[in-house]
Image (cartoon, rainbow, N blue to C red):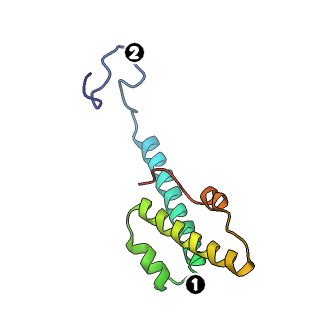
Amino acid sequence: MGNAWDRPAEEGSPFRDGDAKADDLYCAVGRAMSSWERLEAEMVGLYVSLVGSNNYAMDAPAIQAFGTITSPATRANMMRAAAESLFHHLGMQLGLEPAQETIDEALPRGRVD
């Protein structure tokens, strides 16, 4: 098997030549980056809510702590731990056993890094 980064050798392959203009690629990358930034903003908002803070200022301790973690997988683990703790605490107050399946469905899983 050849190097995965080599161009296909077959004539007529749709992947043989790149785009004549880079604009399409730059636009697609820009859209992906913007979507990722929106996801990050939503994640930090959810984390702040899960840890019981109502301070959404950029210098708030919960936001600063979340921002120091650079790995998406570790951020997802932080959110999972905060959610499990919150739902367990709320369930205990209400005399209910927290539904682990609901927590698992609500939080990201799989490889996100």
* Image position of 36 with respect to 29: above or below: below
User: Residue sitting at 26 percent across and 21 percent down?
Assistant: 1
The residue drawn where x is 45% and y is 66% is 75
The amino acid sitting under disc 1 is Ser
Under circle 1, the secondary element is loop
Q: Viewed as shown, does residue 6 lie left or right of 98?
A: left
Q: Position of residue 106 (x, y in %)?
A: 63, 59
Q: Is residue 33 above or below residue 92?
A: above
Split into 4 quadrants, where in the image is the C terminus? bottom left
Q: Which residue is mark 1?
A: 53
**Tag 1 near tag 2, CB within 8 Å:** no
Please identify, in this view, whether the residue under mark 1 or under mark 2 is nearer the observer.
1
Q: Secondary structure at mark 2?
A: loop
Crowd band around label 1 with a 10 angstrom C-alpha radius: few (<14), some (14–19), many (20+): some
Relative image position of residue 112 (x, y in whole percent): 45, 53
Q: Amino acid at mark 2?
A: Gly
Q: Nearer the viewer, residue 93 or 41?
A: 93
For label 2, the residue is 12
